Image (tube, rainbow, N blue to C red):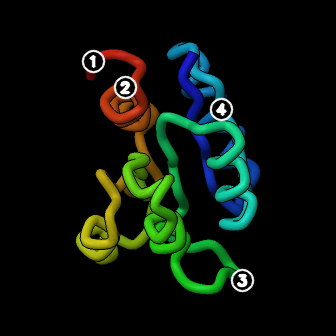
Amino acid sequence: MASILVVDDDCDICSIIALALEPLGVTVLAASSCRQALELCRRERPALILLDAILPGEEGPCLTQIRSHADLAGLPVVAMSGDPLRAQALQAEGAVAVLPKPFPLEELRQLVRRWGGTGSA
């Protein structure tokens, strides 16, 4: 069973995503900080990361921190952002896709199917 790591400081978002992905049969892991996300990535090896683009109190963008680790560099990351102007910058930083907040749940599922190893979109 594939695991998906959701990194967001809003626990309600993590819960909504977990419920939305339940029909796909994936295991949803949650982290509220970049440090916690990096630890979970190393321990659990998720198939995909869903990453809030802005995490308060972090030293630099979490996406950049993830990409700086050679063992995580190839891990697909879908960035989530409420700022449509950040989409291009996030993809330049290495996100495979950007999910605008608020997001339609079916769009979330399609991205997870495509990038999370859970079957075709």
Tags 1 and 4 touching, CB below 8 Å: no
Q: Which mark is residue 63?
A: none
Classify 10 Å Cα crowding around label 1: few (below 14), some (14-19), many (20 and above): few
**Which residue does the image show at 41% across and 19% down from the upper left?**
118
Residue that numbered label 1 is attached to: 120
82 over 108 or under it: above or below: below
Q: Secondary structure at mark 2?
A: helix
**CA distance for labels 1 and 4:** 19 Å
Mark 4: secondary structure: strand
Mark 2 and mark 1 lie on one chain; the one further toward the N terminus is 2
Tag 3 and tag 1, C-beta contact below 8 Å? no
The residue indicated by pointer 4 is 28
User: In the image, residue 20 lies at what x, y percent?
Assistant: 56, 27
The answer to whether one can see residue 51 in this image is: yes
For this rendering, which residue is in front, 30 or 13?
Answer: 30
Q: Earlier in the sequence, mark 2 or mark 3?
A: 3
Look at the numbered discs 2 and 1 and tell me whether their residues touch, using CB distance below 8 Å: yes
- Compute the Cα span from label 2 to label 3: 31 Å
**Is residue 101 in sight in this rendering?**
no
Mark 1 or mark 4: name the one nearer the start of the chain.
4
